[in-house]
């Protein structure tokens, strides 16, 4: 069974408490925190996500899955370590070189936090193979990062399959997370390709009953 990380990007203002408690009751596995800076991606959710993550930490024991879509990774790691996340994922494309990638991996791990590395749709998955033994999760963006409610790019399914094949062949223990356009129509394709953590936001939050959708996505 796969795990579900619910993106809280489109939570309605004023309904945060009700939504977070509802998601916990519906047994989401993680709260997915989409951190955007208005530079690496167009949208800016930085302060809102820091506020939401802090609030969730006070009311829930569910793990926080922090996804940094930012240029200044160093500062963002510092800011979000404060909310004691389960994992912090940063973007390969936001790093100036491979030395910096390893520096950020080590910084996160040294703070007793799991580390994830994310790639945009245009990035060849082979570029990050060398880092896989040092991280806990690889996040494959199945849409262009920065906006909720997008349609899954179908060729990303092949990208996940290539990653899964490489991981199996080299006996690397790692989670593969798919993020973007995940709903009841697209979930099977990414699961069959090898993703074991699915990020879904709009599909879950628009549902009348969160648990029905989460249970279906997990199957």
Image: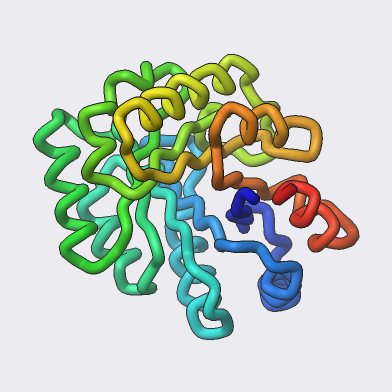
Kindly identify the residue that appears in the image at 54 percent across and 56 percent down: 32
Q: How many marks?
A: 0
Q: x%, y% of residue 121? A: 47, 22
* Residue at the far bottom in the pictured view: 58
Return the residue nearer the eye: 69 or 42. 69
Residue 128 lies in what quarter of the image? top left
Q: Position of residue 109 (x, y in %)?
A: 21, 59
State the residue at coordinates (50%, 26%): 160
29 w.r.t. 170: above or below: below
Residue plotted at (31% across, 52% down): 115
Residue 66 location (% of width, % of height): 43, 56
The percent coordinates of residue 176 (x first, y second) are: 47, 40
In the visual, does 147 lie left or right of 133?
A: right
In the displayed structure, 129 sits above or below 202; it is above
- Farthest residue to the left: give it: 99
Q: Quadrant of residue 165?
A: top left
| Relative to 53, residue 125 above or below | above
Q: Say left or right for 75 vs 61.
A: left
Identity of the residue drawn at 29% across and 40% down: 71
Q: Which colour style is shown? A: rainbow
Which of the two residues, 90 or 155, is positioned nearer the viewer here? 155
Q: Quadrant of residue 205?
A: bottom right
């Amino acid at each position: 069974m796969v795990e579900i990380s619910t993106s809280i990007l489109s939570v309605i203002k004023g309904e945060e408490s009700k939504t977070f408690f509802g998601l916990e009751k519906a047994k989401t596995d993680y709260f997915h925190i989409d951190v955007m800076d208005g530079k690496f991606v167009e949208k800016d959710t930085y302060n809102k996500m820091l506020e939401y993550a802090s609030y969730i930490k006070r009311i829930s024991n569910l793990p926080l899955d922090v996804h940094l879509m930012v240029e200044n990774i160093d500062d963002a790691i510092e800011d979000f370590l404060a909310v004691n996340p389960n994992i912090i994922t940063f973007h390969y494309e936001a790093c100036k070189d491979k030395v910096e990638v390893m520096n950020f991996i080590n910084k996160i791990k040294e703070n007793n936090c799991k580390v994830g590395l994310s790639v945009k749709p245009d990035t060849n998955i082979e570029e990050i193979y060398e880092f896989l033994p040092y991280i806990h999760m690889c996040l494959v963006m199945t849409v262009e990062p920065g906006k909720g409610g997008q349609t899954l790019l179908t060729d990303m399914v092949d990208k996940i399959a290539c990653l899964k094949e490489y991981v199996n062949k080299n006996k690397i223990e790692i989670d593969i997370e798919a993020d973007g356009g995940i709903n009841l129509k697209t979930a099977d394709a990414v699961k069959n390709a090898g993703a074991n953590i699915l990020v879904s936001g709009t599909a879950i939050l628009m549902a009348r009953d969160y648990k029905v959708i989460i249970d279906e996505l997990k199957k």
